[in-house]
């Protein structure tokens, strides 16, 4: 291995000195800024006493006036730069600066001056086969951590927002390079309590790209999933299988029925994360408390939902805080994936982790929605769009899934990917029966408060197999069935058509199996309204505001028309999803260890 060269910007305190010392011990050439050569003579003497001949080069200062000269000297002498370490980045009045003594380092006076200076070294860094930039946030005091600063960084929302924005901007500017970007917040690891320990953590991170032979591709991933309804869980089961195939360590936070579903599917098949070794797939399913929706006569009741959540709030906070600190903080995830989940998203923002969003909701914010769809209920559309934008803003990447694929808005094209429906393996393995040979309709309904459905289906006089109501019995032309994943898929694959609400997961599966659809969106849920609108627009079925006998009969008579439109639809067996996830996670893996 050729001589490694490291530049430290922001020296002038004990942490910078200790980093220089530890790099010197490893035979790395250290470049730093100082007008106090006596201080570094002490470091040199200490290394000489250990029979180490350090390679140190001192610059008077690095600032906008001298940076070109510094870069030229490094290029002439070494022809590359392997490591750039920005030490002690502080948040001061919403400005990120390296707060060092004047003439002993660089002081950034504007938010992105540090970024600008780091960018100037990109040509040199790219001449190294495995270069990296380490950003160290916070400062060390003579008595350990500046806990006041750390507390502010951790708990103050505006500070965390600015910190996340700065980190995102830094990563964005370097995303098209081969340079690894890593961040360390002093004090976020309880096992490192001294300057020596923190310097060791920084140095290990700096040299990690040059130890490629021992570096595992296994990542520690926090995965958050909305627990309301089963659509997010069934979709996430597919993405979790991909992560297990890639041998990652994943901790899943999920609530409600989705917890049991995922626990039953994964916990007996893979070891726990704390027990697994590198290169071995592992998963923990962690139950948290989440928001639940309340319905009356198939209408989403906002007030009842909020009241129910408020009544559960003390238990929710207690359980979720336990999960936050006991299961996640000490585990130190490297990245976060969120399926419209706020818990994992907030964890990522607090700890400066990259985030991949995988859901269908962001289609309204990041894609061009038809004017006709928007104007069908403009207030509901813009309310829903604002909610989606606020819930998971500023993720690093967004993967959006669904049976309809509107064009991505220009300003979001760089970090947004639209993929076909995410389909579970049982759907991919199913060979559907041609619609003209089918004898029953499949009905999915979970709202027991809707009393109009059963009488209308009886009057419909067609054989209907009904899931979701928790009953197992036969009444006239109706057959009620309890939950069975394989049974449901089998009945779907040989159904003449599907009657359900506007939930995306079932529409995705029905469209992929070329089953015509009669959609009655839940009132007050614009997401379902949008799904039903595109379903009808594409000729795959009918969008109805409520279930009524005559529209149902008319839809049934037009089944051949819908089947013809659906015959042109073909899924990609989740291949674009797999490739997109793998590419994004590989990029995230260059940011942390």
Image (tube, rainbow, N blue to C red):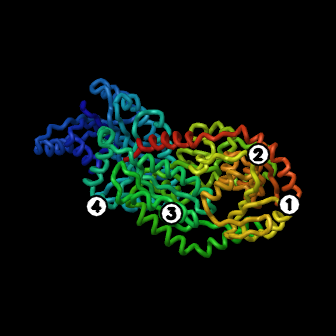
Which residue was labeled with disc 3? 264
Q: CA distance from mark 2 to mark 1?
A: 19 Å
Which one is closest to the eye, mark 2 or mark 4? Answer: 2
Q: Secondary structure at mark 2?
A: loop
Picture quadrant where residue 257 is located = bottom right
Q: Residues within 10 Å of mark 2 (few under 14, many from 20)?
A: many
Instruction: Residue 269: give x, y in percent of width and height.
Output: 44, 58
Residue appearing at x 50%, y 66% in the figure:
287
Secondary-structure class at tag 4: loop
Is 298 placed left or right of 54 in the picture? right
Q: Position of residue 178 (x, y in %)?
A: 41, 34
The correct choice, above or below, for 412 with respect to 193 in the image is: above
Cα separation, mark 1 vs mark 4, equals 73 Å
Q: Residue at x 25, y 43 (%)?
A: 20
Q: Nearer the viewer, residue 576 or 295?
A: 576
Which residue matches tag 1?
548
CB within 8 Å, label 2 to label 1:
no
**Residue 430 at x, y = what percent?**
62, 48
Which residue lies under the disc numbered 2?
A: 540
Q: Is residue 274 left or right of residue 1?
A: right
Give the quarter of the image for residue 206: top left
Closer-to-camera residue (25/583): 583
Q: Earlier in the sequence, mark 1 or mark 3?
A: 3
Q: Which residue is label 4 attached to?
A: 143
Q: Distance from label 1 to label 3 (Cα)?
A: 38 Å
Circle 1 Cα neighbour tier, 10 Å, few/some/many (<14 / 14–19 / ≥20): some
Residue 331 numbered tag: none
Q: Residues within 10 Å of mark 4 (few under 14, many from 20)?
A: few
Badge 3 crowding class, 10 Å Cα cut-off, few under 14, some 14 to 19, many 20 or more, is few
């Amino acid at each position: 291995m050729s001589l490694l060269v490291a530049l430290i910007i922001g020296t002038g305190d004990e942490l910078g000195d200790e980093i220089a010392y530890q790099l010197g011990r490893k035979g790395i050439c250290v470049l730093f800024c100082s007008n106090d050569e006596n201080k570094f003579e002490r470091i040199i003497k200490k290394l000489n006493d250990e029979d180490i001949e350090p390679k140190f080069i001192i610059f008077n200062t690095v600032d906008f006036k001298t940076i070109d000269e510094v870069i030229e000297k490094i290029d002439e002498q070494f022809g590359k730069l392997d490591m750039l370490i920005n030490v002690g980045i502080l948040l001061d009045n919403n400005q990120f600066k390296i707060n060092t003594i004047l003439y002993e380092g660089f002081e950034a006076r504007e938010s992105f001056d540090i970024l600008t200076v780091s960018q100037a070294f990109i040509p040199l860094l790219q001449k190294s086969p495995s270069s990296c930039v380490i950003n160290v946030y916070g400062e060390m005091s003579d008595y350990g951590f500046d806990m006041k600063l750390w507390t502010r960084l951790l708990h103050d929302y505006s500070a965390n927002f600015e910190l996340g924005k700065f980190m995102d901007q830094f990563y964005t500017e370097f995303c098209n390079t081969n340079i690894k970007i890593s961040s360390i917040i002093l004090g976020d690891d309880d096992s490192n309590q001294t300057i020596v320990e923190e310097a060791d953590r920084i140095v290990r991170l700096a040299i990690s790209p040059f130890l490629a032979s021992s570096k595992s591709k296994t990542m520690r991933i926090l995965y958050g999933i909305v627990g309301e309804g089963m659509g997010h869980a069934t979709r996430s089961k597919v993405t979790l299988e991909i992560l297990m195939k890639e041998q990652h360590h994943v901790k899943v936070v999920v609530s409600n029925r989705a917890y049991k579903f995922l626990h039953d599917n994964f916990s007996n098949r893979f070891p726990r994360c704390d027990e697994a070794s590198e290169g071995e797939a592992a998963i923990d399913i962690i139950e948290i408390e989440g928001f639940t929706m309340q319905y009356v006569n198939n209408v989403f009741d906002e007030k009842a939902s909020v009241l129910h959540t408020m009544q559960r709030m003390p238990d929710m906070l207690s359980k979720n805080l336990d999960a936050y600190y006991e299961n996640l903080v000490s585990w130190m995830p490297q990245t976060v994936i969120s399926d419209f989940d706020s818990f994992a998203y907030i964890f990522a923002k607090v700890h400066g982790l990259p985030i991949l969003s995988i859901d269908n909701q962001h289609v309204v914010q990041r894609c061009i929605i038809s004017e006709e769809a928007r104007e069908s209920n403009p207030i509901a559309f813009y309310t829903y769009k604002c909610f989606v934008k606020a819930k998971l803003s500023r993720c690093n990447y967004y993967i959006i899934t669904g049976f309809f694929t509107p064009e991505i808005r220009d300003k979001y094209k760089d970090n947004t990917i639209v993929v076909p429906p995410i389909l579970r393996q049982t759907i991919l393995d199913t060979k559907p029966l041609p619609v003209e040979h089918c004898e029953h309709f499949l009905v999915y309904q979970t709202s027991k408060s809707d009393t109009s459905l059963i009488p209308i289906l009886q009057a419909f006089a067609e054989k209907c197999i009904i899931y979701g109501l928790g009953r197992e019995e036969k009444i006239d032309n109706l057959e009620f069935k309890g939950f069975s994943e394989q049974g449901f898929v089998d009945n779907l694959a040989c159904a003449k058509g599907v009657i359900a609400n506007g939930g995306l997961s079932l529409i995705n599966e029905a469209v992929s199996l070329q089953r015509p659809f009669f959609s009655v969106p839940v009132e007050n849920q614009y997401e379902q309204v949008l799904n039903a609108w595109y379903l009808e627009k594409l000729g795959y079925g009918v969008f109805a505001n409520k279930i009524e006998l005559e529209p149902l009969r008319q839809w049934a008579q037009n089944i051949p028309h819908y089947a013809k439109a659906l015959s042109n639809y073909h899924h990609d067996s989740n291949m674009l999803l797999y490739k997109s996830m793998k590419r994004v996670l590989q990029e995230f893996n260059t940011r942390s260890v």
